[in-house]
Structures are given as C-alpha cells and as structure tokens.
Amino acid sequence: MASTTYDKELNVALLAVQRASQLTKSVFHQNAKGTLNKSDASPVTIGDFGAQALIISALQHNFPDDEIVAEEEAKDLRENGQLRDLVWGLVQDTKLSDSAAEQTLGGAVKSADSMLDIIDKGDSKGGSKGRIWAIDPIDGTKGFLRGGQYAVCLGLMVDGDVKVGVLGCPNLPVSDSEPLKDGIGTDASDEEGKFGVLFSAVQGQGAHSRQLGAAGLQQAKSIKMSPLSNISDATFCESVEAGHSSQGDAANIAKKLGITKPSVRMDSQAKYGSIARGAGDLYLRLPVRKDYVEKIWDHAAGDLIVREAGGQVTDVEGKRLDFSHGRTLLENKGVIAAPKEVHARVIEAVKEVLGAKQ
Ligand SMILES: Nc1ncnc2c1ncn2[C@@H]1O[C@H](COP(=O)(O)O)[C@@H](OP(=O)(O)O)[C@H]1O
Ligand SMILES: [Mg+2]
Ligand SMILES: [Mg+2]
Ligand SMILES: [Mg+2]
C-alpha cells in the first residue's frame, strides 16, 4: 500500500530546497545575476534556472513517475550558450556538504544538455489526478534582486490537494520569535547562523520551521499562528509590488477592521511562512488587474503551511484555493490568509471594500 505519511517526500523536499537555496545564495553574492526579462515583463535570473534544475533532478531521482509543474523553461538557455554555461557552472558547483544527504538527492547532474532537459521536465499541465509537484525555484525574483525577501518553494499535490509543502527563505531570521520587519531593500541578510529558515508542513501533521544550513537538516520546531484575540491589534503582511496586490484596498480593509499598525511588506511566500510562525497575522493579496490568474507554484507550499499552523487560506470570496485546475488557480481571485478564528471577519471586510468598488 502507498505510504500516506509522506516521510520520504518531506525529507527529499527539505533537502532539495536546502540545496537549491544554497545555489541562490551563491548567486545573491555575485554581481552578475544574468537577469533576463520574460514575456510578462517579470525577471528571471541564473539563480532561478539553476535552482529549478537542482530540484527537478532530485525529484526525478527519487520519484521518477511523478509529474512536475515548474515556473521556468530552458528556452532562453538553449538560445544563449553563455547564459547556459553560467547556469551549468552553478549547478555543478552546488552540493550539500553532508555527503549522505547529497546521495539522497542523486548527486550531480550529468551534463549541460541533460540539465536543459531536466529544466524542461517542469512542463506538466497539472490537474486533478495523480502526484504533481509544484516548483517556484525563486519566488519573489524582484525581492531577490533587491536584496530583499525571496523563497525557494516546493509542494506536492495528490489528486489536486496539497500534501507536502516546503519553503526555503534564506533572508528571513532563523528565530521564530524575531519581530517581523519590512523586507523591501538591501536590509535583508543571509548571514549564516542568524538568517535562513526552512518552513515545512505535511497535511494532518502540523507545520514546522528549522534552520536552513548548508549541512544536513537541523531539528524541527513546531510553529503556530499567533493567537489574535483582538483583530484591531493585527499586523498585515503584503506584497512589496503595488502591481501584485492593491495597497489602497488593503488600507481600506485595515480601516474597517480598526487596524492601525502599519503593514509589513515583503516579497514572496516568505509572507506565508512569517504569519504561520506568528510574525504578522494576516496576508492579503488583493487583485489589481482583473485578468491576472495566480500560478499554483506561487501558493501551494504556503497555503498548506499556514493551514497546518492553524490558519485559514481562501480567495477574496472566501473559497479555498483550488490547485486542481492546471498550472493556474483558475477558479480563485486573490488570497486572504488569517487565523481561523478571525478569517470570516476579515472576508466580511474584504467583501465590503471590494464590493463598494463595483
Ligand atoms: N499582476 C500580478 N498580480 C499578482 N501576482 C503577480 C502579478 N505578476 C506577477 N505576479 C507573481 O507574484 C509573484 C511574487 O509574489 P509577491 O508579490 O508576493 O512577492 C511572482 O513570482 P516570481 O517572483 O516567482 O515570478 C509572480 O508570479
Ligand atoms: Mg517569475
Ligand atoms: Mg513566484
Ligand atoms: Mg519564481
């Protein structure tokens, strides 16, 4: 019978995210990040391509029959040999210092050409059947380039339901009790020992955090959302990018809820991880453009981590995020994540504010 505890999946996911995070950190310390602009005007770097190659390689070694939905494709690298060589150099150089852990991930990628094929293995259409991994090799690429927050994200969905989620956040404090602060600019640091956290969750088994180190896995600590007895004491966590979430709508919702504390802004799914460990209370993603459809890799891991930490995650209408419709969250608009006890009250305020605009 198939295992339903997902021990192996979690272990491989943690190590794969750890190794890929190590690659992104080495790019973070380089001046040349090989930045390209994609067709939707969003950036991609050699760190995104390299991290995606390392994660898919680890998944293929351990779970060869699973499908993979990943954000990036190798097209730009196939057309630009110089860029391909930069990524290949990074992929070859990045290993976990714990050799048993490196062995678990299947060791090195064979050649530059096989690396390109591996990157393109993330082209699954997704859907409601079977085992599908969702990968965002660098979420918050803009934050990564600014020296702000970013996350390496991996989730496993089975029949459209997220079972395992892992987020590597190299620039967040290790300590779960550190106060939340803006992660917009060059204030963030990945100084080993103080910064770098791995969040994880398995459905029905709670959410955890541990230090994101270069060696094997550190001891996990259980995390919980902060108990929020009075909603007016809440802190909002929002995107840095005004084009990703309406800051004006968020301000009006805060006013309705009597919230006076300033919002904390940070890029990426680091927002989900932060509220899951009680650093901040509410994550609001309020649609700016009517035509934008959220991508599953931007939410799969964070959604499970927050729910396992005692939160509720829905879209702006109060519907659960539905990962079974392919590569995008076709049936959802925006995201509202809050402690269970206050989620309904937040949705009420969201509906009043968004409804008044119609
Ligand atoms: N108009 C839009 N509205 C909402 N999200 C958008 C967007 N354009 C891009 N994004 C997504 O927002 C993600 C970053 O999230 P956040 O705003 O929370 O930092 C990006 O992930 P990548 O950086 O992986 O491309 C991208 O997928
Ligand atoms: Mg992107
Ligand atoms: Mg993303
Ligand atoms: Mg990305």
Image (cartoon, grey):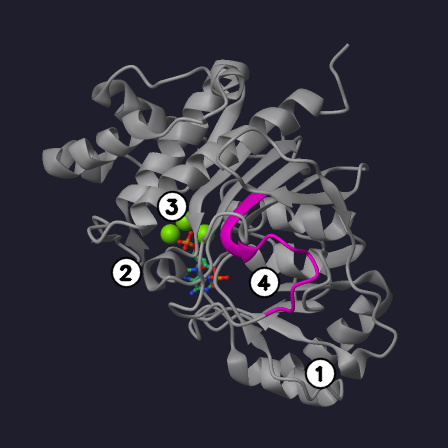
Image quarter of the N terminus: top right
Whether residue 105 appears in magenta in the rendering, the answer is no
Circle 1 residues within 10 Å: few <14, some 14–19, many ≥20: some
User: Is residue 46 shown above or below 283?
Assistant: above
Give residue 203's mark.
none
At label 3, counting other C-alpha atoms closer than 10 Å, the crowd grade (few under 14, some 14-19, many 20 or more) is: some
- Disc 2 residue lies near ligand 1 with CB under 8 A: no
Which one is closest to the eye, mark 2 or mark 3?
Answer: 3
Q: Nearer the viewer, residue 100 or 134?
A: 100
Q: Which residue is mark 4?
A: 333
Give the spatial CA distance, label 4 vs label 2: 21 Å
Label 3: which residue? 25
- Pick the quarter of the image with the C terminus: bottom right
Q: Earlier in the sequence, mark 4 or mark 2?
A: 2
Mark 4 sits near ligand 1, with its Cβ under 8 Å away:
no
Q: Which structural element holds mark 2?
A: loop
Please state the extent of the stretch shown in magenta in the rendering: 167-180
Q: Which residue is mark 1?
A: 352
Query: Of marks 2 and 3, which one's residue comes earlier in the chain?
Result: 3
Q: Quadrant of residue 46?
A: top left
| Label 2, label 1: how far apart the Cα atoms are | 32 Å
* Camera-nearest residue between 331 and 137: 137
Upstream in the sequence, badge 3 or badge 4?
A: 3
**Does dot 3 land on a helix, a strand or a loop?**
helix
Query: For the residues carrying marks 3 and 4, which lies nearer the camera in this image?
Result: 3
Report x, y in % for residue 232: 78, 83
Question: CA–CA distance between discs 1 and 3?
Answer: 42 Å
Q: Which residue is mark 2?
A: 41
345 lies left or right of 128: right
Tell me the residue at 33%/36% (across/down).
50
